[in-house]
Image (spheres, grey):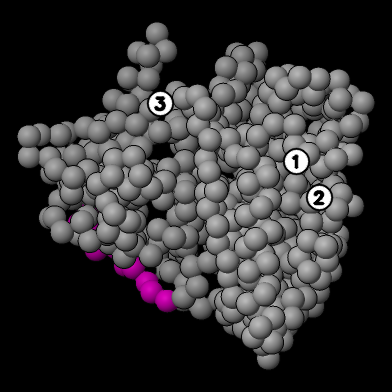
Amino acid sequence: SVTDLILALDQGTTSSRALTFTKDGQILSQGQMEFTQHYSKPGWVEHDPEAIWTSVVKTAQTAIGDAEALGGQIRAIGITNQRETVICWDRATGQPIHNAIVWQDRRTADTCNTLKAGGHEEAIRAKTGLLLDPYFSATKIAWLLDNVDGARARAERGELACGTVDTFMIWRLTDGASHVTDETNAARTLLYNIHEGAWDEDLLDLFNIPASLLPEVKLSADDFGQASGDILGLDIPITGVAGDQQSASFGQGCTAPGMTKATYGTGCFVLMNTGHEAALSDNRLLTTRACRTSGPPVFAMEGSIFVAGAVAQWLRDELEIIPDSPASEEMAASVESNDGVYLVPAFTGLGAPHWDSEARGAIFGMTRQTNRVAVVRAALEAVGYQTRDLIKALESDGFKPDLIRVDGGMSQNNWLMQFVSDLTGTPLERPQNVETTALGAALLAGLHIGLWQSDSELDAVRRADRRFEPGMGEAERDALTAGWDSAVAATRFFADKQRG
C-alpha cells in the first residue's frame, strides 16, 4: 500500500532534496532546492548553514505535503549528506558561529603540509584510513576554533557543538535534543579511529580539538532522535543516517566484499566493499567505514574525484558554452574523437590517486580548429579518465571489480557511461532509480523500524535499468590514456613550478 513511507533527506553539495519512498522503493513525492556556493577566496568554498537548513525544511515540507495528499504516512526519516563539510554552532541558541566549510575547501593545505612535514601522516592513516588532506574535517574544525573570535575559549567551556552536516540537521530537527552522527560520517573527520570505533584522543590532541565539541557516534541504522512536529508538521523518528557515498553504496546493494559502485554527482566516488577487513591501499586510496545495521564493522576502499558533475556546471555557468547538462551528451557524441584535446579539471586540486591540493585546471592540445564541442567532449572524457585512474589503483591494490554499479545525475549520460566502461574495461550497471543515495538512507531508516525485514526484501527494491559493456580496442584505449597521463603530469609540473 502507499500508506507506509520513508522520508529521505538528501543534503548535497549544491542542493537539498527530500524524497518519499514506498515499500517497493518507488519515489512518491519529492522536493529540491539549490543554494548558494560562496567562494570568498581562491580555493575557499563555504555554505551558509541557515541556507542549508532552509532548503532542508522547505524540501521536506514539500515532499511530506505531496505524499500526504496521496494518502501516504511518513513512518521514519533517513538522512544522507555531503561528507566532511563542517559546521560549529552555539549549544544554547543553535546559531552557527561561521559559515560551513565545505569538503572542497583547500584553506588548510598549509596546516596539512606542516603536519606531514612533522611526520604525522602514517600514524593518522593507520588509525583513520585517511590521508592528511584539507578535504577532511579535522583541520577545518581547528581553523574555525582559531579564526572565529572567541571560538576556542567557548569550545573549551563546552558552549559550542560541532559536526558534519547530518549532525547539524539532526540537532535542528530534534530541537537540540540529539547531538549525534553515524560511523560513516565520523570516519571522514580524521578524528575517528575506524578500528576501535571511537573518537581518538591522540588525534584530538594533535589537531587541538576538545572532545566536548563532538557528537555521539551510532550505527547507520539506529535511533537518532525524534524530528519535532513544530518543524515538519508531525513527530517522526530519525532512524537512518549515512554519508552520501556510503549511502549510495548501500542503496546499490554493495553489501558483500568486492561489490563496487561509482557515484557521479558533483564529484565522483568509487567505493568497494572489503567486508570486515580494513584493507590499506598502496595507491593512496582511502579506507573507510561502510554502512552497517548490526554485527561487526564493515569497511570499504574509496577513491574520490573532486570534479565530475561540477564540470558540466562549469561549462554551463562559467564558460556558458552549454545551455544545460544534458546538452553535453549530444555535443560529445557529435564528434568522432577528442582531436588530442585534454581537459584536466583540477579546479580544487586533484583527488585520488594523486592527492595534489595545489594542482589547478588546464586544457592541453588545442589548435586553431578547437571549438566548444571539443572542449565539452574533453571535459566529459576527463570524468572517464579519472574513473579509470581509480579503478587502476584498486586493481594495483589487488581488488579488481568485475562489475561497477553506477548512479548519480551524470550516470544518465549514456555516452559517458559507455566511455567509462570502455576505458576501465569493466561492465557498468545502472539502476532504474539513479537516486540511490537517497534510497540508501531510506532503506537504512526502514530496516530499523522493520518496514523491510530481510536482504531479499531489499534486493527486490533495487532494480537494474541498463548495462554497458566495454567495446574499445586495447590500442585505442592505451593511446587515449597515454595522452591523459601526460596532461595530468603537465598539470602537476605547473603546480610544482608555482609552488616554487
Residue 257: percent from left, percent from top: 60, 60
Residue at the extreme top: 500
- Residue 419 within the magenta-colored segment of the rendering: no
Residue 428: percent from left, percent from top: 39, 65
Local packing at callout 1 (Cα closer than 10 Å; few below 14, some 14-19, many 20+) is: many
Instruction: Give the residue type that dot 3 points to.
Output: Ala
Instruction: Give the residue type that dot 2 points to.
Output: Trp
Instruction: Give the residue type that dot 1 points to.
Output: Gly
The residue at which mark 3 appears reads as: 359
Q: Are marks 2 and 1 in contact (CB under 8 Å)?
A: yes
Residue at the extreme left: 368
Q: Which span is picked out in magenta?
A: 465-475
Q: Secondary structure at mark 1?
A: strand
Q: Are marks 2 and 3 in contact (CB under 8 Å)?
A: no
Q: Earlier in the sequence, mark 2 or mark 3?
A: 2
Q: Which mark is residue 163?
A: 1
Q: Nearer the viewer, residue 88 or 497?
A: 88
The image quarter containing residue 200 is top right
Tell me how far mark 2 sits from mark 1, CA to CA. 10 Å
The residue at which mark 2 appears reads as: 171
Q: Secondary structure at mark 2?
A: helix
Q: Earlier in the sequence, mark 3 or mark 1?
A: 1
Residue 444: percent from left, percent from top: 71, 67
Tell me: residue 430, above or below residue 274. below
The image quarter containing residue 212 is top right
Q: Is residue 478 left or right of residue 86?
A: left
Give the foreground label among 3 and 1: 1
Q: Earlier in the sequence, mark 2 or mark 1?
A: 1
Q: Residue drawn at (76%, 19%), measured in percent from left and top?
A: 149
Q: Residue drawn at (81%, 20%), measured in percent from left and top?
A: 150
Tell me: residue 427, above or below residue 160. below
